[in-house]
Amino acid sequence: MKLLTGNEAIARGAYESGVVVAAAYPGTPSTEILEEIAKYDEIYAEWSPNEKVALEVAIGASIAGVRSIVAMKHVGLNVAADPLFTVAYTGVTGGLVIVSADDPGMHSSQNEQDNRNYAKHAKIPMLEPSDSQEAKDFVGLALSISEEYDTPVLLRITTRIAHSKSLVTLGTREPTQAIPYTRRISKYVATPANSRILRVGLEHRLRRLTELSNTIEVNKIEFPEGESEAEIGVVAAGVAYQYAREAFGDNAIYLKLGMTYPMPLELVRQVAERVKTLYVVEELDPFMQDQIQGAGINCVGKQVFPSIGEFTPEVVSQAVSINAAGSASASGTGSSSAPEEAGPDAAASPAIARPPSLCAGCPHRSVFYVLRKRKNIMVTGDIGCYTLGSAAPLSAMDTCICMGASISAGHGASKAFSLTGRDTRVVAVIGDSTFFHSGITGLLDVVYNRGSCVTIVLDNRTTGMTGHQDNPGTGYTVKGERTVEVDIGDICRALGIERVTEVNPYSLSEIESALDESLSLNEPSVIVVKHPCLLKKPSPTDARSAHMARTNVIEDKCRSCKLCLSIGCPALSIKEFASIDPEVCAGCGVCVQVCPFHAIERETVDEG
Amino acid sequence: MKAKNESSTRTILIAGVGGQGIILAGRVISEALVSVGFDVKMAEVHGMAQRGGSVTTQIRFGRRVYSPISETVDYLVAFEIMEALRWASHLRDGGWCIVNDCKMPPAQVLQGKADYPDVAVQDFFPNAKIITVCATDIARRLGNPRVANTAMLGALSAIKPFDQCNFANALAANIKPRYLDINRAAFDQGLASVSVTAERCT
């Protein structure tokens, strides 16, 4: 028995089930799945440039006859949705599992979409583990279902499964099997003629899967000891089942679902007949509730439970007590009156908010400091640590929509401004990993369609926010093997950008002049701001800047003007004079350049 | 303050600031609890948390644990004073508050836009058993402020049922060998610094 997170358990499940190929793009809360898989020599693992590529890699491996797995965060499945919907038609050869890690409560995401809807939408089966043991076991189960029913399988987890540790019994690895390859054009070439036939098969498969869902052992009715009927019945899956167990205790009948699509409506009916009130406990959308009610079975769901945010045992029990008190509308479907996500009690606590911020010495800070001072520009941002450039006091970002949107949305905004006679300029800001993910196609669009937006690539030589994963620009694979180090400047030039400038983030004057030049042009340009993230040990080819040196305030010169605070560095504060916390300061020297009175000096400055 | 949790499952909330080693501390406690036969679940939060924001980790233990999280906690282990205040309302009456005597001003305070709350921890937890640990000072004296988390674990190990746990093995399993000695020292000093208080409180 070992304590594993759900993500570690899924990796272990992939290992034990004989998976041969694994692919992913990092994204909280899914990232550690591939990081852990990469530790097994028996499995080929890769960081793909984006989730669509990752799923296609796994599809190819499956068609070639081996078991494969692909993992991504919920919004990643939007990127991978194109292959998803068609591989549902073609089916598989080797088992194919698609892990979607959803983030109710948006701990680290831009939205809280409920990806269970993808199973229904794409017409593929879905499993939902409720702890780490099931996370491990369900990988093997999903692969078996995938192969037996000739379908990809969605393994849907949430943050509390991905990042919660619980005890897991480990097993050994099944022998790897490679199914002999034969060309099967009518199955794998999705032309209209073939797809019309596959489309019929898809419905037939769903009917067989519905039968499976009503009989599979992971969908089970749990009775109170010695009872076959109860006041309360509960339908739940995933971590919501654990919350429900604590909220309802041992006297309810539980329909504990491991397979939630297709829904086992026969089992639901059996439970409904044995209870007075049937509760459907699910976070986010009324996914199960709608299907249960659609089958004509009465239940209580989103009339009392929130559809926004995460549940806790307390959220569930409070909602139920409100319902028992009869204050809930029996016919209501909204959730506006339902209790919302639990958090610190702001009203009762004198604690001041402590939001995340760019680290001391972060190479992104200076760029936002420079951008904030510019008038009449729009800064289109992207997904990564640098989204924190939108936070005060930098407040230097206008938009953040999704991976890669900085450049393409910036292009659209730029066209809109110029077509309507406004001289507002657009600067797109994107990180290195996000550029590889989906920035390249946006930049191609800018070049092709004669745009003029300025693109700044913040190249910190890693995928920062998710915890330092390699990417095509770092020169290393997820297995730590040396590989080609793709140069961002070369890509931009190859796309047709003529003006590509590389600057040092710790020189404000370099950034200022590069930006001046780019904004003076009536053509697209790229500024690559290159320096490794300070939290990561730099690779041998990424030697850290030699300019780092501790800084001190010369109090005689400080006029307490607070200008240095405008860079938002956590090492800087002001009492009587500006003050630098030596335990926090990374010695980047940006504050030295910001102070108009030369009141901040560096201890040793090595200009080499 | 919340009423006592009726179930046999108990909850530890570790609260602090991103970068203080909260997840590591949670893993060590979890493994130490498993070693004495508890069922354990631990909920971590990753992602944005590393960038200096408020961070929490929960550990729940008992005969059989269902949910990895709970809004009512029995032990609040705060690595920073204001983080203790932030989560105070979740500590049940009679629960333990183990707090590092350390203030880390948030951005608003650094910017001069707010004052760090001027509240004595004792006043804010009238119904809790409080242990104050100078964990950051212990860590600084040992030469590495980052081992304050292990000093906090030492303090926690002074009270039941953690005094029964094998923390030595859990530390060795989670900490790189070259940092093990300094972490052991921090643990021992954290424990020694509170033993008197704990006896009085138990």
Image (cartoon, coloured by chain):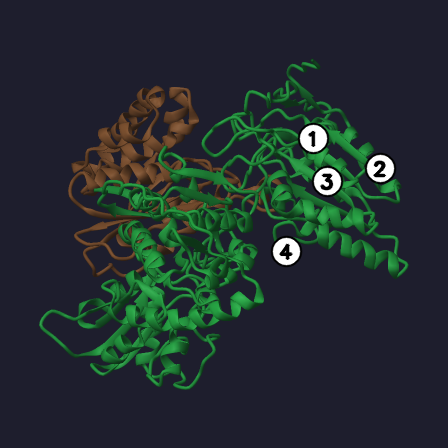
Chain colours: A green, B brown
The residue labelled by disc 4 is A401
Type of amino acid at the residue the image marks with label 1: Pro
Which amino acid type is marked by label 4?
Ile
Please report, as a chain letter, where disc 3 is located: A
Place of residue A255 in the rendered image (x, y in percent of width and height, measured from the top left) = 25, 70
Element type where label 1 sits in the image = loop
CA distance for labels 1 and 4: 25 Å
> Mark 3 highlights which residue?
A456
Which residue is the extreme one toward the left? A226
Q: Which numbered marker is on residue A595?
A: none
Classify residue A192 as left or right of residue A41: right
Q: CA distance from mark 2 to mark 3?
A: 13 Å
The answer to whether marks 3 and 4 mark residues whose Cβ atoms lie closer than 8 Å is no
Q: Amino acid at mark 2?
A: Asp
Q: Which residue is mark 2?
A: A516
**Which tag, 2 or 3, sits closer to the chain's start?**
3
| Type of amino acid at the residue the image marks with label 3 | Ile
| Image location (x, y in percent) of residue B9 | 22, 54
The residue beneath circle 1 is A505
Which residue is at the far right?
Answer: A421
Quadrant location of the N terminus of chain B in the rendered image? bottom left
